[in-house]
């Protein structure tokens, strides 16, 4: 029986236009924050110039790098690529299933809901409402909205699959399924948090656990938001545009399953060379290396599909964009494993090399694939010709020059700064360069990078113009086709038993189980597990050779059944995270955490910490001295041999603040002990660390007066805003609920403690004869009281606390199967 | 492509090109064998996984990061102590005042080090103040050009002070103490900075006799 159906191409048009619009916004913010690294005035002072003095400001809080960088990443990932992905998925899924999207209402809710979320993000992030976890910064009410909209999308998608008039699922759909399931899992777990108010919450994980969960999420946001959906889009649009068959179906199968299974394990490579347990670092590094081939499988299938269509590169801009996009995918998935090697990472991490790496993915892979798709779609969605091929070609070349300039500049910047930071002075006993010197020496590359980004943005604006003119030259068109209806009994007939309990799966799961036992079992038993696992692999190979058809038929059957397929994808992506994260959640290492246990914050320090988070300080400052000699020499304290950041030092940090990029120096040891007044009496709460309170004060007001050449914004508004002391009792109560061992404190005690500490610090500032440039009339008690209320004093209190810990005696050597390191290698050497 | 693709299920032999029977929305699929070099990179990475894990946990091939840091930082410390001893053997008040501080090359090297590391707290003009707008405000450090030497005014007292930081009994200036600069500066650099100071405020050191 056949019938005529009309595809819902309106949603596709909407998502596409939204993607282009948000793409321009996101890239514009990117260009702005890139220039901020070269010229501090771009943090707000520039408004003074362009408004001819109507606006007066040294800096504007919502225009600072710390607040805008999350806006840039979120806009580009979730708004630009997100909308592009939805456009591609809605377009191709309908055609691959030969059915209109299941529900127009759900499509509408999905579209408008997603745009509202983006607007909410664009308002809250610059305002300083943030959770501070990268690409997971949005506050909890928006998180809930994201989950709801994602569920709407998922229901709409799977419902469409259920209604399909095509017996089996094409490889593009496999990737979409993996995207939807995995993003849901990652997003929900990494956003679990306990609200303290409508705009603020603490993540339920702290310290190491928070870091692990964050990068399990962060790395796989790259995998399952920026990679798998775009691979699906590649599998649909590239063979369509090239009009060539896909290169290899079996490569699709092998690289799909290996990619989704292995990707999840690679998260800890973002925490290499920290004090993270070594077994996790090894899994992160080794799985990243294993990920190289599966990633290149996608690239091969894309590029080799173009065999016989390469001549189209000359004439068809779509093919040009796709070919270059896939090539960039290959390049950045080669660079990724390279950067995951611990020795390479020691140099590259915390530098701009990482930023260059993600941009070769984002600009090269995502951006070019998006443009290729738009140029292919627009004439079809508006039933016309592309307005200008020449303009598309120009976009291509401007964009290409932009990417290369950008990426090469950041390679140079990252490698150069990494080498400089590690360089020792004459005699080899001290480091040759101060942090600031290394920053100044890469300024030229920062300028080139801004130029590259600007060129890329210009190219993309040409794309917007071209698509707009194309749309104007045609009329919106929804394609209609004749399809043969598929009876319900003709599809999805596989029984669950058949799907989940069968020969190939049994072999694979058993071998996997023993491999995992190999990680965790005590010495000798682990080797036995490895041997069993290898034997199972041999047996699996033999049974594959004997019954090849049986195995291939199984997969053929599986892709005719979307639900069992989805369940198996979920199992494949769930294993890695479970093995890596659950052990660190179960073992309470508080008493054994390498002898150092974090000192609890005082109420004022906690308030300061929340301000630090809200200002986005973590975007430029790490709090993690890695287990590397140059780091210990630079940031460790004199005479302390093992002075890298121990895990116990951030045990109670919700959220953790280890950071991922150093535009400024590490702050892990910024704080110090309780200070003494001139008479020698210790203060009640006030601490002084590496630098005095007045140093911090003056540095916040004008960083360049203290550190000439610094590109940090001035934080003058910290003086105008008051610390929210009233919120503290509730925040502390929530922290207790999360397991932070605060002593029992009444509301009064909490506010009194905060008051005492802020007065101590304010008095020390007044004694140091500081003054507020904007309010020179304030002095004496008036000045002290003004300071004591200000956010500035709270942040200083927090900075002076950083790195404070108690030495903890170990009861007995700590050994646990859930921490394989302790069973095998010796624990860290004792302090001399 | 030399071979005409056959319509069928799976490639069975090397070099055989199969075009799968089914097509999706007009998209066809070949079923080429996996490239060998690709397979070997994959297998190689898997083998390396097992090998590296084994080497790390079952042999002493790799040290832990903790061991490495521990050993190397101690080695650096020992080197530093030896270097300090060597410098101290050749350095005394008189040498600093009459030899080092009179050598313009040494003084300008000291000035460079001072401006990078010290001026943030002691001021570029040694007065421990900074000009903000019309006002002069104090910096966290103590002034160097005021003739007061809180912890001893002999060049070698300064050497010890800079090297090891404020003495433990000091309550600091407003709570803030000077860090031990031996972590950042070599003994030679410290001596150069002192030479620069001597050259800047020679009056404070005029009592040191030449040998």
Image (tube, rainbow, N blue to C red):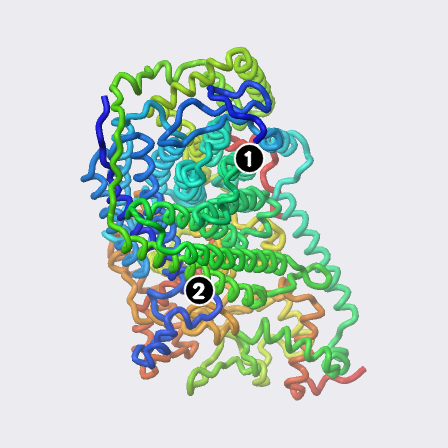
Q: Residues within 10 Å of mark 1 (few under 14, many from 20)?
A: many
- Which chain letter goes with mark 1? A
- The location of residue B207, given as percent across then percent down, is 71, 86
Secondary structure, mark 1, is: helix
Q: From what the image shows, is residue B79 above or below residue A257?
A: below
Counting residues from the start of the chain, the first of labels 2 and 1 encountered is 1
- Which chain letter goes with mark 2? A
Q: From what the image shows, is residue A398 above or below residue A6?
A: below
Q: Residues within 10 Å of mark 2 (few under 14, many from 20)?
A: some
Closer-to-camera residue (A383/A715): A383
- The location of residue A681, given as percent across then percent down, is 44, 67
Q: Is residue B162 left or right of residue A365?
A: right
Q: Is residue B117 visible?
A: yes
**Which residue is under mark 1?**
A293
The reply to the same-chain question for discs 2 and 1 is: yes
Checking the image for residue A682, the label placed there is 2
Q: Is residue A84 left or right of residue A628?
A: left
The residue sitting at the right extreme is B211
């Amino acid at each position: 029986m056949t019938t005529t159906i009309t595809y819902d191409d309106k949603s596709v048009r909407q998502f596409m236009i939204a993607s282009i619009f948000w793409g321009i916004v996101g890239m514009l913010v990117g260009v702005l924050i890139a220039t901020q690294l070269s010229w501090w005035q771009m943090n707000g002072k520039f408004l003074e110039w362009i408004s001819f003095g109507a606006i007066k400001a040294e800096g504007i809080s919502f225009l600072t790098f710390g607040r805008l960088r999350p806006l840039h990443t979120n806009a580009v990932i979730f708004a630009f690529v997100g909308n592009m992905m939805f456009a591609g998925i809605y377009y191709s899924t309908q055609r691959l299933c030969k059915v209109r999207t299941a529900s127009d209402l759900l499509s509408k809710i999905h579209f408008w809901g997603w745009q509202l979320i983006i607007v909410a993000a664009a308002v809250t992030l610059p305002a300083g409402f943030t959770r501070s976890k990268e690409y997971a910064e949005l506050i909890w009410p928006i998180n809930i909205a994201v989950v709801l909209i994602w569920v709407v999308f998922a229901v709409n998608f799977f419902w469409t699959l259920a209604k399909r008039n095509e017996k089996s699922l094409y490889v593009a759909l496999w990737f979409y399924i993996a995207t939807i399931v995995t993003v849901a899992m990652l997003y929900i777990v990494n956003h679990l948090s306990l609200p303290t108010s409508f705009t603020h919450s603490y993540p339920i994980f702290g310290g190491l656990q928070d870091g692990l969960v964050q990068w399990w999420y962060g790395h796989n946001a790259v995998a399952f938001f920026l990679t798998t959906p775009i691979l699906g889009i590649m599998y649909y649009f590239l063979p369509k545009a090239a009009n060539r068959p896909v290169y290899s179906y079996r490569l699709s199968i092998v690289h799909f399953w290996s990619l989704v299974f292995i990707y999840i394990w690679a998260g800890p490579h973002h925490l290499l060379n920290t004090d993270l347990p070594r077994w996790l670092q090894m899994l992160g590094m080794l799985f990243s290396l294993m990920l190289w081939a599966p990633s290149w499988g996608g690239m091969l299938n894309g590029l080799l599909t173009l065999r016989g269509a390469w001549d189209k590169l000359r004439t068809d801009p779509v093919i040009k964009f796709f070919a270059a996009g896939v090539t960039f995918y290959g390049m950045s998935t080669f660079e990724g494993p390279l950067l995951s090697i611990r020795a390479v990472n020691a140099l590259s991490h915390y530098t701009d090399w990482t930023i260059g790496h993600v941009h070769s993915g984002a600009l090269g892979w995502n951006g070019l694939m998006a443009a290729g798709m738009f140029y292919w779609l627009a004439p079809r969605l508006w039933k016309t010709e592309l307005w200008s091929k020449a303009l598309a070609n120009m976009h291509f070349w401007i964009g290409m020059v932009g990417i290369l300039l950008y990426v090469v500049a950041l390679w140079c910047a990252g490698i150069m700064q990494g080498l400089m930071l590690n360089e020792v002075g004459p005699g080899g006993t001290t480091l040759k360069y101060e942090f600031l010197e290394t920053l100044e020496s890469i300024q030229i590359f920062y300028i080139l990078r801004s130029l590259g980004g600007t060129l890329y943005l210009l190219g993309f604006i040409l794309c917007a113009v071209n698509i707009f003119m194309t749309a104007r030259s045609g009329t919106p068109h929804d394609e209609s086709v004749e399809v043969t209806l598929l009876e319900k009994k003709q599809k999805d007939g596989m029984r669950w038993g058949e799907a989940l309990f069968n020969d190939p799966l049994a072999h694979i799961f058993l071998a996997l189980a023993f491999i995992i036992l190999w990680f965790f079992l005590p010495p000798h038993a682990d080797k036995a597990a490895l041997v069993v696992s290898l034997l199972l692999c041999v047996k699996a190979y033999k049974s594959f050779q004997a019954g090849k058809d049986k195995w291939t038929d199984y997969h053929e059957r599986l892709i005719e059944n979307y639900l069992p397929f989805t369940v198996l994808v979920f199992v494949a992506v769930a294993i890695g995270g479970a093995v890596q994260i659950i052990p660190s959640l179960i073992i309470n290492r508080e008493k054994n955490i390498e002898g150092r246990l974090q000192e609890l914050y005082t109420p004022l320090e906690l308030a300061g910490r929340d301000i630090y988070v809200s200002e986005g300080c973590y975007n430029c400052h790490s709090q993690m001295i890695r287990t590397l000699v140059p780091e210990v020499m630079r940031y460790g304290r004199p005479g302390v041999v093992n002075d890298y950041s121990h895990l116990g030092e951030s045990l109670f940090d919700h959220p953790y603040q280890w950071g991922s990029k150093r535009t400024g120096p590490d702050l892990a040891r910024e704080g110090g002990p309780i200070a003494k007044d001139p008479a020698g009496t210790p203060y009640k709460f006030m601490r002084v660390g590496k630098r005095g309170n007045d140093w911090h004060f003056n540095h916040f007001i004008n960083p360049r007066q203290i550190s000439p050449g610094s590109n940090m914004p001035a934080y003058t508004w910290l003086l105008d805003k008051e610390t929210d002391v009233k919120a503290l009792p509730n925040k502390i109560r929530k922290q207790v609920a999360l397991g932070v061992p605060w002593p029992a404190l009444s509301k009064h005690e909490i506010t009194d403690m905060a008051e005492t500490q802020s007065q101590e610090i304010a008095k020390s500032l007044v004694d140091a004869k500081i003054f507020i440039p904007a309010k020179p009339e304030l002095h004496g008690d008036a000045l002290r009281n003004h300071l004591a209320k200000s956010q500035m004093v709270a942040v200083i209190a927090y900075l002076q606390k950083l790195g404070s810990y108690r030495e903890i005696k170990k009861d007995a050597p700590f050994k646990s199967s859930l921490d394989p390191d302790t069973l095998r290698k010796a624990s860290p050497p004792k302090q001399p | 492509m030399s071979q005409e693709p056959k319509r069928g299920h799976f490639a069975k032999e090397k070099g055989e090109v199969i075009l799968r029977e089914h097509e999706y929305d007009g998209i066809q699929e070949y079923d080429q064998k996996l490239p060998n070099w690709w397979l070997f990179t994959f297998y190689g990475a898997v083998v390396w996984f097992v090998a590296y894990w084994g080497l790390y946990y079952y042999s002493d091939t790799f040290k832990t990061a903790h061991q490495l840091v521990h050993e190397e930082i101690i080695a650096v410390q020992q080197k530093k102590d030896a270097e300090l001893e060597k410098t101290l053997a050749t350095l005394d008040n008189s040498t600093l005042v009459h030899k080092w501080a009179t050598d313009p090359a040494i003084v300008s090297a000291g000035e460079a080090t001072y401006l990078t590391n010290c001026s943030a707290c002691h001021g570029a003009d040694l007065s421990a103040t900074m000009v903000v707008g019309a006002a002069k405000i104090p910096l966290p450090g103590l002034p160097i050009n005021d003739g007061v030497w809180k912890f001893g005014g002999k060049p070698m007292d300064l050497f010890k002070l800079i090297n090891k930081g404020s003495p433990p009994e000091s309550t600091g200036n407003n709570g803030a103490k000077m860090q031990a600069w031996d972590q950042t500066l070599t003994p030679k650099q410290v001596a150069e900075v002192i030479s620069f100071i001597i050259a800047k405020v020679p009056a404070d050191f005029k009592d040191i006799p030449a040998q």
